[in-house]
Image (cartoon, rainbow, N blue to C red):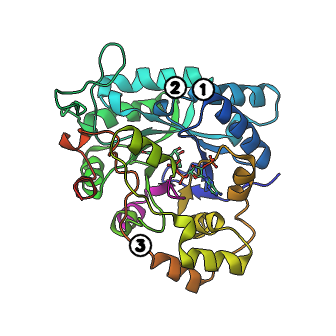
């Protein structure tokens, strides 16, 4: 069975450079996808309560662990503190719930999903104002929430802790108060949104980058349309340079986009697929190497186009820690 290279985190833990994204798949789809992904050699699985599929993923993991087909220490399971619960007192209960759903004793990485917090009603539904915009909880305190995240490591409930969608300024603040520095910052990263300053800052601080939406996240178009904010999103598979490089290596554009992220061994990528052929394709990126010229060409494609700008959370831009002001007001 194939396996992937690893990134060594700032606490010595090892994270497989290629993981499976699990956003926007039904329980049935994700059970099949995780099962096949494990057969193919994926060991890193990225999920979140927001994706609504931790129980389905947990069912597959339990089957594999019970059958002895995989050892727990060979899995790398990532989940997240949801934006509706981004408060210190919710950290332990939320992870406890995720662990129950995933049927695990610990996760390998627990992330603060977003730097902002949104409000829900007692029934679990979002709160909206009279204009139909999401209500936010502006009291978000990263240092206080992080202190509770650190306790998860002490309790052996999370091997590593990290953040997602954090800006450099937010990380700088966190680094001043933390005892355990974040092990990763999971951010949108692909050829059209390279975020070089943020990436350079994180890498200089020994915080790895996990690249989400590495293929340009077609699924976000559906979310935006459902929220009444449709946008034309770029098709990364149709970029001439990407297609030309793919043809040279006899690979697909998706494989080139993923290889570009993982080749330096400084970043992980977590493409999502619920399709057997594409799961295989996305994993089959370790038998070719992009030349330095090709890497340079791909780096030159940056357009600062953010695809996952949380437009589907209309109203969240009012939050004082909202990270994406520039893109949102474009
Ligand atoms: N931390 C955060 O805030 C955050 C935000 C967004 C995403 N994420 C994580 O990152 C993961 C990946 O991001 P994403 O799901 O937004 O987008 P993505 O991985 O860039 O793209 C997934 C989409 O591309 C399709 N696809 C996958 N492989 C393909 C291939 N080889 N050729 C053609 N199409 C392909 C998938 O369809 P099929 O399933 O039909 O193959 C799906 O529609 C998520 O699933 C989630 O785990 C995190």
Residue 178 sits in which quadrant? top left
Disc 1 to disc 2, how far (Cα)?
6 Å
Q: Does the magenta stretch include residue 210?
A: yes
Q: Where is residue 105 in the image (x, y as percent from the top left)?
A: 60, 25
Residue 120 sits in which quadrant? top left
Residue 228 position (above or below residue 231)? above
Locate the C terminus by quadrant.
bottom left
Residue 272 position (above or below residue 315)? below
Residue ID for mark 2: 98
What residue is drawn where x is 47% and y is 57%? 208
Crowding at dot 2, Cα within 10 Å, few <14 / some 14-19 / many 20+, comes out as many
In this picture, which residue range is highlighted in magenta?
200-217
Q: Check contact, mark 3 vs mark 1: CB within 8 A.
A: no
Q: Check contact, mark 1 vs mark 2: CB within 8 A.
A: yes
Task: Look at the numbered disc 2 and give the secondary structure of its residue.
Answer: helix
- Which of the two residues, 222 or 186, is positioned nearer the viewer here? 222
Residue ID for mark 3: 302
- Which of the two residues, 52 or 204, is positioned nearer the viewer here? 52
Q: Nearer the viewer, mark 3 or mark 1?
A: 3
Sequence order check, earlier mark of 2 and 3: 2
Task: Look at the numbered disc 1 and give the secondary structure of its residue.
Answer: helix
Residue placed farthest to the bottom in the image? 293
What residue is drawn where x is 27% and y is 39%? 314
Residue 99 in sight: yes
Residue ID for mark 1: 102
In the drawing, does residue 306 fall left or right of residue 131? right
What residue is drawn where x is 40% and y is 30%? 151
Disc 2 to disc 3, how far (Cα)?
36 Å
- CB at disc 2 and ligand 1 closer than 8 Å: no
Disc 3 to disc 1, how far (Cα)?
37 Å
């Amino acid at each position: 069975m194939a396996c992937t290279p690893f990134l060594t985190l700032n606490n010595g833990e090892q994270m497989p450079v290629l993981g499976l994204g699990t956003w926007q798949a039904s329980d049935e789809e994700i059970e099949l996808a995780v099962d096949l992904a494990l057969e193919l050699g994926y060991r890193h699985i990225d999920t979140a309560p927001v994706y609504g599929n931790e129980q389905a993923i947990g069912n597959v993991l339990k089957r594999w662990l019970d059958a002895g087909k995989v050892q727990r220490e060979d899995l790398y399971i990532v989940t997240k503190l949801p934006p509706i619960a981004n408060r210190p007192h919710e950290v332990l209960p939320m992870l406890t719930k995720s662990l129950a759903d995933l049927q695990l004793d610990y996760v390998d990485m627990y992330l603060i999903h977003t730097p902002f917090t949104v409000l829900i009603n007692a029934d679990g539904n979002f709160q909206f104002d009279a204009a139909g915009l999401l209500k936010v909880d502006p009291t978000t305190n990263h240092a206080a929430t992080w202190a509770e995240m650190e306790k998860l490591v002490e309790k052996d409930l999370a091997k590593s802790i990290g953040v997602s969608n954090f800006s450099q300024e937010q990380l700088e603040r966190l680094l001043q108060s933390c005892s355990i520095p974040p092990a990763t910052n999971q951010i949108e990263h692909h050829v059209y949104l390279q975020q070089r300053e943020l990436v350079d800052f994180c890498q200089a601080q020994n915080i790895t980058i996990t690249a989400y939406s590495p293929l340009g996240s077609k699924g976000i178009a559906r979310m935006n349309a459902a929220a009444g904010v449709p946008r034309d999103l770029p098709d990364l598979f149709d970029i001439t340079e990407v297609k030309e490089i793919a043809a040279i290596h006899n690979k697909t554009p998706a494989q080139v986009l993923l290889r570009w992220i993982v080749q330096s061994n400084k970043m992980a990528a977590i493409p999502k697929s619920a399709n057997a052929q594409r799961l295989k394709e996305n994993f089959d990126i370790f038998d070719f190497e992009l030349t330095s010229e090709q890497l340079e060409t791909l780096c030159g494609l940056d357009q600062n186009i953010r695809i996952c700008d949380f437009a589907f959370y209309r109203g969240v831009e009012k939050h004082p820690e909202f990270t994406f002001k520039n893109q949102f007001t474009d």
